[in-house]
Image (cartoon, coloured by chain):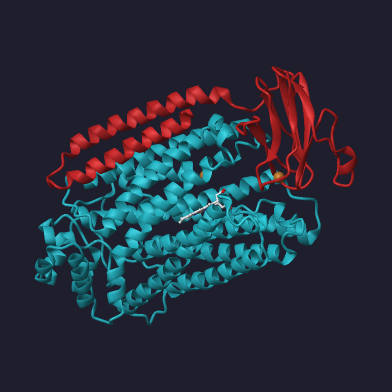
Chain colours: A red, B cyan
Amino acid sequence: MNPSLAIFLVSTLVIAATFLWVARSTSEPGAIDYARANRLRGVFGVSLGVILAIFLVLTLPRLPYPVEAAAPAHVVNVVGKQYAFSVSESPGPQSLATWEAEFSPVVEVLQGALVEFRVRTLDVNHGLGIYTPQGALLAQTQAMPGYVNRLRVQFDQPARIPRCVWNSVACRTTRCVP
Amino acid sequence: MTALANPPTATPDAYARQMTRLTLVWVAVGLVLFPILALLGLVMRTLQAGYFRATPPEWFDAVMTLHGLGMVGVWFVAGLAALSFVLSAYVRPSLTVSKLALAMTALGVILLLVATLVGRLGVGWYFLHPLPFHSTDTWPAWATGALFGALAILGVGWTLWAADILRAIAARYRLSEALGWSYLSGRTDVEAPPVVVIAWVSCIGVLAGLVAAVVILLLVAIEVIGGTAPSDALLIKNLTFYFGHMLVNITMYFGVGLVYEIMPAYTGRPWKINALVVISWNTVLALVMFAYFHHLYMDFAQPRWLQVVGQVSSYLISVPAAVVTIFSALVLVYHSQERWSLAPTLLYLGVMGWAIGGVGAMIDSTITVNQQFHNTLWVPAHFHTYYLMGVVLMILGAVYHLATALTSERRELSAARRLAVAVLRLRSGDGAGSALLGHVPPDRARHDCDGIHAGHVQPWPSVGPACRRVMVSGRPEVSVHSVRALAS
Ligand code: HEM
Ligand SMILES: [Cu+2]
Ligand SMILES: [Cu+2]
């Protein structure tokens, strides 16, 4: 199971069980020991803090944003418009007027290579997703007017379909050759 | 100030009556729109499940746009209306401004309905610039005009409304009191109840969010009318999600404010202001404005450190919510005399849904996770949990709690009789105790009610929110402002 989903389901069970337990306690009304409650609150707060700190330490060093140092072996230029993505090693379409002439539906990349996708758009914002042939999302970024978003992906497995996530749009393929 | 708040001729009693009537109208608007918008949600799920394949795809987008903007709007106004009513036990929000906001909301809703259902405008709630101007002939230009018109009208109306709540609070409490700082510095003579502190924090947040919306509208207007170069897309996206994030989170806080104010009536225990409450809500105010960066994780052009700020703030903001509010709600209920009639059950479940949806939100606010989850169903799944199973239940619970008081208002009874009727009706809802209640003499009740919010003068009669267990349980520490009003 996806670890995020597992964490979510376990947390949900714990929360629901706690709320149920507290709700059931009202069948025996009585006074409450506020000092004890606040000690428990302290323990809860510290535990939550520790859990959050652990997750921050584990996840923050693994940001998907490229750092300058490692120059990519492969650069793929992605240009989006409503409703297609052009993918190529050449710069790709520079305007909507020249789209048909400069459009490239497929690009091949080497398996195992680190690929940098330089993602632009000619009209509106688009979401770019790279999927496995089975349809699982490998990586994604946004295409934003006036910006180049650089997404780096290591292809350990074949990949296809840069897909625009907004709308069910026509998709073209990135083929990954072994 | 006072002139704005109310015509000087309005007697306190008339104010209470009008406030009640106006709240009823707001609630009615919400209760009518909610099922319609929920039905649209069902339509979307049906389309996603592959039924009605002949439907043109732009219908999904148009329906989703209406559903998203509509739902967020409905619960925002329902929450603020319920909060205003509850607040009117302490301060005096203007009825005129609320009516103006109501009229502007109606106008905005009509424009949205036309833009989406007639014009098939399908830009999503975030109408992310420049999409509204790139319809590829799916919707006409006038639909885009109607959308921006609606946003402008709603933005101005709600800004005025939130600003008026701040004005009303400021008329009674100093800034340091409204934020609870005076409490921290040991001055406990004038203490604002939690709901006032939460309302203050929330309305500041509303204004901050709506200012961002106004800036977007101005940038777009300059671009369209002035024919200048396109506005910076990253800036507009930041402003857009700041606005959306603030509005949705603040609606959540409206619900939480209602829980703070109403839950104690059912558990027979006070939920007073204390240092923790003050610190937690001030922390929330500081953090909520930075957490919005979690909406731009997949915009790699955004400065990296802002992405980190987004994750850290999103994580930290769970601490005041969980350790203070949610934990305190549990302590409030634990071994209490809670009887689980409809209102407290909804409030309690709302807190639970908020906690569960919040976990989903926190997971999604982890950048490495968001790389997988952004733009997937995880996003609507988690916010529907904390909305539908959270704030919606809180507001419905609050509305149900207030409903009897609200409807009995119509009978034009005296304040005292009205309250008695409301209380009796509510009590009879959960069984025992109503007979006893009927025998509580007004001044005994007033005496009993002096505890929890001691120091508050109740300047006009209103059917306040929190007044029942008091007499039933004979627990003098639980207060009810309205009870004091009864004898005044
Ligand atoms: C009552 C039952 C509800 C159903 C069946 C429902 C269903 C849906 C569905 C199917 C979507 C589209 C998700 C997607 O494919 O991306 C959606 C989006 C959304 N819903 Fe709901 N929903 C419900 C209640 C609510 C409530 C209570 C709220 C908020 C108060 C809400 C706010 C939203 C928002 C903001 C969106 C996103 C719209 C956009 O992306 O432009 N929904 N809902
Ligand atoms: Cu697209
Ligand atoms: Cu957010």
In the picture provided, is B111 more to the left or to the right than B290? Answer: right
Q: At 50% from the left edge and 59% from the top edge, which residue is drawn? A: B71
Q: Looking at the image, is B411 positioned above or below residue B216?
A: below
Q: Looking at the image, is B465 positioned above or below residue B293?
A: below
Q: Quadrant of residue B78?
A: bottom left
Q: Looking at the image, is B344 positioned above or below residue B317?
A: below
x then y, percent, for residue A79 = 78, 38
x then y, percent, for residue A132 = 64, 29
Q: Quadrant of residue A131?
A: top right
Of residues B372 and B82, which is closer to you in this image?
A: B372
Whether residue B334 is visible, yes or no, is no
Whether residue B388 is visible, yes or no, is yes
Q: At 42% from the left edge and 53% from the top edge, which residue is drawn? A: B388
In the picture provided, is B155 more to the left or to the right than A162? Answer: left
In the picture provided, is A168 more to the left or to the right than B320? Answer: right
Quadrant position of the N terminus of chain B in the picture? bottom left
Q: At 38% from the left edge and 26% from the top edge, which residue is drawn? A: A50
Q: At 55% from the left edge and 22% from the top edge, which residue is drawn? A: A61
Q: How many marks?
A: 0
x then y, percent, for residue B414 = 23, 80
x then y, percent, for residue B285 = 45, 46
